[in-house]
Image (tube, grey):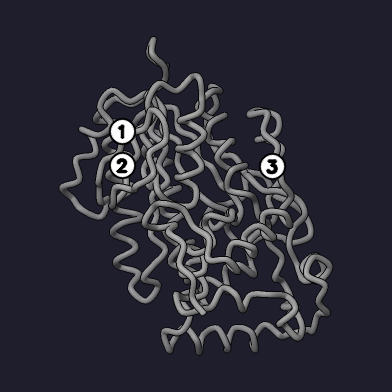
């Protein structure tokens, strides 16, 4: 459903890693008439046919139904990764805020909802074969990120039952990287005081090889194209999104030219737990536990039903992120603003 002047799309979390890519593609799309980006802070960035609203999803008074009024689709991307030491705060934004988004979509009679789920919603799975979208989505309960993503899968099950008139699409991407997200991801996972220039392969004596540490990745712009295709096609349900190859110690050692040294899981987890406990590392040991158990995803459904294939490999996406980390790259939005440390 789109108006004579083009589709009207509202994007929550429009200034983050995925949001900036989705908004840019929508602003360039001939079938999109206007884009309304929702974020806690209005950015200096102003792409064509885009207007902004300052909205905090953690607030019960956020006027979401008013913001969604007249929209042909809502793309829900907003997410807070921190503070990892205060899961009640992230729960208010991520879970309660998302439920408010779903309720507002129904209240404003928006016909399409595209929700950013994640590989993190999946229950533990295999690392030697890929699973499709029917794999259970109960997450890893100790990790707040996975717990929240999995809870929202159940909330959407109920929403779809109660509102069959809304076409709901759930995107489940792998780890998403682009150069402009480097500063944000350094702060989220490595801490604001981790010096980007130090992240150079030649400065590392070796690459730790932790058993089970095998994950998938994707360039953020490739993920954004899948969101756009989900608006164009009359599809419903979940779509896995990832690029080849899966990233493990062997692939990374070849990419970075480093030798690997086997590091037992308990030793790696103990180091992460100690740094997290001292507030030196934002990424929690519970998230590390979850990453070790994430399944590899089969993306055949996105290939066949959306006509989507990534244009960059997983190693190209990671290499771009590493370049951005070294140079303190970012974008003209508060979450992505570049900051050099060191």
- Place of residue 209 in the rendered image (x, y in percent of width and height, measured from the top left): 75, 78
Name the foreground residue: 87 vs 189. 189
Badges 1 and 3: C-beta atoms under 8 Å apart? Answer: no
Name the foreground residue: 15 vs 243. 15
For marks 1 and 3, give the CA distance.
Answer: 28 Å
Which residue occupies 49% across, 35% down?
Answer: 169
Check the image and report above or below for 12 versus 187. Answer: above
Q: Earlier in the sequence, mark 1 or mark 3?
A: 1
Q: Is residue 296 left or right of residue 122?
A: right
Q: Quadrant of residue 81?
A: bottom left
**Residue corresponding to mark 1:** 105
- Place of residue 271 in the rendered image (x, y in percent of width and height, measured from the top left): 58, 88
**Residue corresponding to mark 2:** 101
**Residue corresponding to mark 3:** 299
Q: Is residue 198 left or right of residue 312?
A: left
Secondary structure under the numbered disc 1 in the rendered image: helix
Which residue occupies 40% across, 34% down?
Answer: 160
- Place of residue 184 in the rendered image (x, y in percent of width and height, measured from the top left): 47, 63
Dot 3 crowding, Cα within 10 Å, few <14, some 14–19, many 20+ = many
Name the foreground residue: 289 vs 178. 178
């Amino acid at each position: 459903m789109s108006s004579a002047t083009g589709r009207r799309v509202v994007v929550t979390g429009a200034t983050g890693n995925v949001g900036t890519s989705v908004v840019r593609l929508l602003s360039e799309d001939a079938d999109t008439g206007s884009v309304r980006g929702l974020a806690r802070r209005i950015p200096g960035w102003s792409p064509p046919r885009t207007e902004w609203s300052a909205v905090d999803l953690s607030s019960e008074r956020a006027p979401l139904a008013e913001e969604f009024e007249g929209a042909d689709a809502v793309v829900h991307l907003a997410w807070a990764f921190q503070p990892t030491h205060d899961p009640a705060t992230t729960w208010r934004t991520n879970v309660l805020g998302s439920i408010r988004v779903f309720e507002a979509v129904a209240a404003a009679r928006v016909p399409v909802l595209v929700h950013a789920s994640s590989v993190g919603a999946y229950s533990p799975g295999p690392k030697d074969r890929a699973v499709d979208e029917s794999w259970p989505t109960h997450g890893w309960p100790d990790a707040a990120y996975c717990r929240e993503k999995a809870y929202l899968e159940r909330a959407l099950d109920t929403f779809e039952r109660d509102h069959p008139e809304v076409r709901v699409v759930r995107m489940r991407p792998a780890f998403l990287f682009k150069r402009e997200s480097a500063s944000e991801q350094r702060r989220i996972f490595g801490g604001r005081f981790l010096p980007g220039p130090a992240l150079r392969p030649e400065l590392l004596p070796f690459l730790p090889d932790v058993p089970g540490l095998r994950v998938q990745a994707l360039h953020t712009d490739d993920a954004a194209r899948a969101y756009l295709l989900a608006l164009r096609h009359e599809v419903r349900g979940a779509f896995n999104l990832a690029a080849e190859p899966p990233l493990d110690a062997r692939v990374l050692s070849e990419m970075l030219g480093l030798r690997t040294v086997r590091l037992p899981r308990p030793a790696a987890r103990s180091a992460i737990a100690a740094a997290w406990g001292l507030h030196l590392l934002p990424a929690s040991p519970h998230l590390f536990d979850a990453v070790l158990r994430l399944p590899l995803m089969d993306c055949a459904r996105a290939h066949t039903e959306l006509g989507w294939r990534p244009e960059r490999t997983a190693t190209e996406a990671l290499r771009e992120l590493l370049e951005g980390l070294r140079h303190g790259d970012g974008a003209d939005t508060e979450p992505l603003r570049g900051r050099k440390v060191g």
